[in-house]
Amino acid sequence: MAILTVASLKKRFGGLVAVNGVDYSFPSGEISAVIGPNGAGKTTFFNLITGIYVPDGGRIELDGKSLVRVKPHVIAKLGIARTFQNIRLFGSMSVLENVMVGMHIHLKSGTPGTILGWGKVRHEEQEARRKAYRLLQYVGLERHFNEEASSLPYGAQRKLEVARALAVQPKVLLLDEPAAGMNPRETAELTALIRRMQRELELTIILIEHDMKLVMQLAEHILVLDHGEKIAEGGPAAIRNNPKVIEAYLGKNAVEEGVMA
Amino acid sequence: MEINSTRERLAGSKSLQAGLLAAFVVVTSGAVYLMDKSVLAFLLLLGSLLLLYYTGFSNGIKWASAGILLLLVIPFAASGGSSHEAYMEVAAQCGIYVAMALGLNIVVGFAGLLDMGFVAFFAVGAYTYGIFATAQANNFIPGSLFPLPGGSFWIFILLGGFMAGIFGILLGLPVLRVKGDYLAIVTLGFGEIIRIIFNNMEKPINITNGAMGLSSIQPPDLFGFKFTFPHQFYFIVIGILAVVIFAVRRLEHSRLGRSWKAVRENEIAAQSMGIPLIRTKLTAFAIGASFSGMMGVVFAAKQTFIDPTSFTLVESTTILVMVVLGGMGSVPGVILGASLVTILNLQVLTELTSALNALSNNGYIGIPTALSPSKMQRLIFGLILILFAIFRPNGLIRARNRKVSLESVAGSGVYPAPAGRAAIRK
Ligand SMILES: Nc1ncnc2c1ncn2[C@@H]1O[C@H](COP(=O)(O)OP(=O)(O)OP(=O)(O)O)[C@@H](O)[C@H]1O
Ligand SMILES: [Mg+2]
């Protein structure tokens, strides 16, 4: 069953059509991937789903509810969380606090209660810290909980983005190039983590990734974009052998010379 | 080597710290008490609060000691000579500016919104009390009810804060659509507009008495006791300041404080985590403004006279300098920055000016009055801003994240990495 559906989705930047009439349904509880060459429109696609950009046409629906023109913070409440290709952590805040920001919508403390220091507020904060720490354990960053987020190594920053997104308690998790800049060991850890999240947390995961090995290992469904258009969709095996995909990635000649074969 | 070992010994021994601090307080307060108007001695006495900040005592002890210093030692030491009121005036002004700077720090330091017109909220507070605590309000409210008695002052502290908060929201609604440098320019314009409105609201109905200002503002009255001298206002200021500091510290590490900082660090990520941008920024504006508004009420009562010239762009810049100098987002830093700049303004610059004047009057040197230090205030603040931006962008005391203990987050004992949905749901 589809949890997230886009139809005829379109986004223009001036003369450039970054996403051009894309239709796709992401099945609930499974891992899907969005792939395509640089500039294909993948990140723009995520930005449309999460409300950062307003589409120029088409529909986006989460569980049948339209997300078009819905504000990003409301979309988070509706159950979509994400990570960013160009890491967007709250750099000068601590690792633990970054995760706690992700818990924002699940905390209730208001301003008066905070200033007066009501017991309820203190209790909630204490619980929030514990839970944030558990999420850090989940992604393997608990050692760093007191450090400044910007001081973490690159791979750890990407993991922190994942933990922060998990704190939103989403139904759908969007990962934009989560393995970019990771070494092979970190990539392997991440692969395991993504699979674990899907199984244990019953998440629908959609990832953008250039690392084909990771994509083929994880994704059950693949959407291929090129120049903003959907050029293929299907399972890993079908995508691997699709001439259009090979052409998009390697150029026309590659298909003729049978490089991928 | 020698210095290092001394430092280690000092850091290790709390009794040594306490002894040195006590000796320092005794010497400086004695000096303030015995000497007549010694800026240096008074500065050093206030400096004992900074020393206290750097001691290794628990927060409770630090706050209690600060309370004793502020409520007993400083007022007593200052009462020694003819400059009693002058000292207390400086101390009260310090407190007023510290509260304002802490308010601006919420906007600029926590939420990262550069507000160049912050004094407008101070003006709103001051006029809120000024209009109703003089006969002015009779011009537009029939029945000769005004001036309200000084007993209303206490409610007006809250009202002034509330009004300023409302203005903060009214300003924020249109202004928060722009970002960065544009925001600075728009808020700068807003600050000036408020001042000009106060300057011109004498026609068609005389609400603010225009450029003439409001005079004979009622002094605060507590069960028949009237507050008229700076040394009396000092205690009101300290009382409000205590509330402000308390509130700021609570807010800083709360859900709201985190969302301010998240918005400052990265708007897109903050939104994607479910933080409503406009609302979060508006609360920063409103709460910051309300601190300023409360002190505006006190200012009006203390001066007994206000007019629009007290609320110029220079004032806004001064408060901004306090925040930048102290350290944006750093509560202790901002307190220090505000105190230093106030003292620089009120004491050091004026003292230097009169010293130079004395010299030139005696014919030793000839300095044109245009170059007197108090006239160069803007130049000096400009230099401070530039130098700090280049060499010490984090200010005197940089903002630090609160470290939490492992036990408090992990519970006692080793916590097994949990599996399953429970990990994120519970
Ligand atoms: N805010 C923007 N304004 C103008 N053009 C944009 C904007 N965002 C993206 N684009 C353009 O839209 C096209 C698609 O960009 P997008 O970032 O979605 O690509 P991508 O598939 O994520 O590429 P990559 O693999 O390099 O991350 C690019 O040509 C890009 O330059
Ligand atoms: Mg991209």
Image: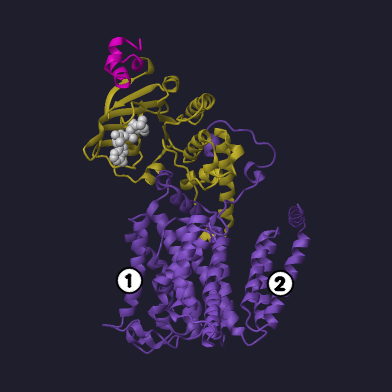
Chain colours: A yellow, B purple
SS majority, magenta: helix
Quarter of the image containing the N terminus of chain A?
Answer: top left
Counting from the top left corner in percent of width and height, residue B50 is at 64, 65
Same chain assignment for discs 1 and 2: yes
Q: Is residue A246 magenta?
A: yes
Residues packed near mark 1 inside 10 Å, few (<14), some (14 to 19) or many (20 plus): some
- Report the front residue among B3 and B416: B3
Image region (quadrant) for ligand 2: top left
Which chain is indicated by disc 1? B
The answer to whether B252 appears left or right of B138 in the picture is right
Foreground residue, B240 or A198?
Answer: B240
- Residue B351 highlighted magenta (yes or no): no
The residue that appears at 68% across and 82% down in the rendered structure is B35
What is the CA distance from the residue labelled 1 to the residue labelled 2? 46 Å
Which residue is tagged 2? B25
Number of marks in the image? 2
Residue at 73%, 74% in the rendered image: B27
- B387 left or right of B23 in image: left
What segment carries the magenta color? A238-261
Q: Amino acid at mark 2?
A: Val
Residue B193 tag number: 1
